Image (tube, helix red, strand yellow):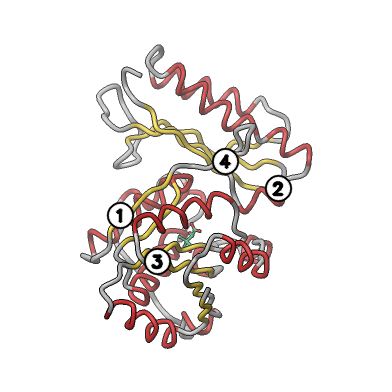
Amino acid sequence: MKIFTTKKELQQYLLQIKGLHKSIGLVPTLGALHKGHISLIEQAQKNNDVVVCSIFVNPTQFNDPKDLEKYPRTIEADIALLEQVNCDILFNPPVSEIYDDNEQWHLEIGPMEQLLEGKSRPGHYQGVTQIVSKLFNIVNPDTAFFGQKDYQQFSVISKMVELLKMPVQLVMCPIKREADGLAMSSRNIHLTTADRQHSLVLSKTLNWVKENFNRSEIQQLKHKAELMISAEEGVELDYFEIADGETLLPANEDTKTIVALVAAKVGKTRLIDNVLLIHGQ
Ligand code: PAF
């Protein structure tokens, strides 16, 4: 695997690849890689000739400095994992390579920016769009791969690509789960043994909502789900929403694509999860 830490060297190398008319897939990550990330790399390998993984703990998307400081950094293990799955290129720049001092960014994303994660983490999606647009401009990928676990992030990035008319195709890959249902996340490292047990209420509740989706009204399902999660020891519910999969506004009985999304603090760790709901299934 080729490892680049500067834009210039990466771009010079990618120019040669583009000269050979090879397609490029990009998997942007914050590192602390797990099987969920690896599934993105594998999907990118299926769809593209060359795969670039970026590892960059992007400071502008963390509204809480403690969260940024605490974010797991496991670069040696990440490199070993990427080599094991034959990833072609790793882009692992320092912050100074990506940001100039006092750099400004604002993208008018629309109402979605203020909902759910956006409400709990003000400015988060400005930071996400800022870094993802930079990575798209540096790598110029044909296709970029993101996990469904960050469903709202995928919607926001799709909106950015549409607004800025960026020539990249986006692919959303399914959530990878542990055997007991917990959605894989780099943050799971922080869960204590007790937290780990309590965290299961999130996927269990989402599954319960999915199973009962065609049997109950949306408002009743949401209310019951909120009660189920709030009743779990050590879990502090942030939001549970049954939303329109396109706008992320609350869904009603006529909404076509529906997604149930949850965020909660389990012990000291904030987790998110979601499930797509289908009428008539
Ligand atoms: O989902 C993530 O890991 C990050 O938000 C991303 C897309 C790599 C941007 O920093």
Closest to the camera, between mark 1 and mark 4, is 4
How far apart in space, not on screen, are marks 2 and 4 (Cα)? 17 Å
Choose the circle earlier in sequence order: 2 or 3.
3
Choose the circle earlier in sequence order: 1 or 3.
3
Location of residue 33 in the rendering, given as x and y in whole percent from the top left corner:
59, 58
**Is the C-beta of the residue carrying label 3 under 8 Å from the nearest atom of ligand 1?**
yes
Q: Residues within 10 Å of mark 1 (few under 14, many from 20)?
A: some
How far apart in space, not on screen, are marks 1 and 3 (Cα)? 11 Å
Up-down relation of residue 39 to residue 131 (above or below): above
Closest to the camera, between mark 1 and mark 2, is 1
On screen, residue 64 versus residue 21, left or right, reads: right
**Which residue is depicted at the point 37% across and 15% down?**
214
Closest to the camera, between mark 4 and mark 3, is 4
Q: Which residue is mark 2?
A: 268
**Which residue is depicted at the point 25% across and 73% down?**
21
Location of residue 45 in the rendering, given as x and y in whole percent from the top left corner:
41, 58
Three-letter amino acid code of the residue under disc 1: Ser
**Which residue is depicted at the point 77% across and 44% down?**
192
Q: Which residue is mark 3?
A: 132
Q: Which residue is mark 4?
A: 183
How far apart in space, not on screen, are marks 1 and 4 (Cα)? 23 Å
The label on residue 158 is 1
Choose the circle earlier in sequence order: 2 or 4.
4
Res 157 → quadrant: bottom left
Q: Nearer the viewer, residue 257 or 263?
A: 257
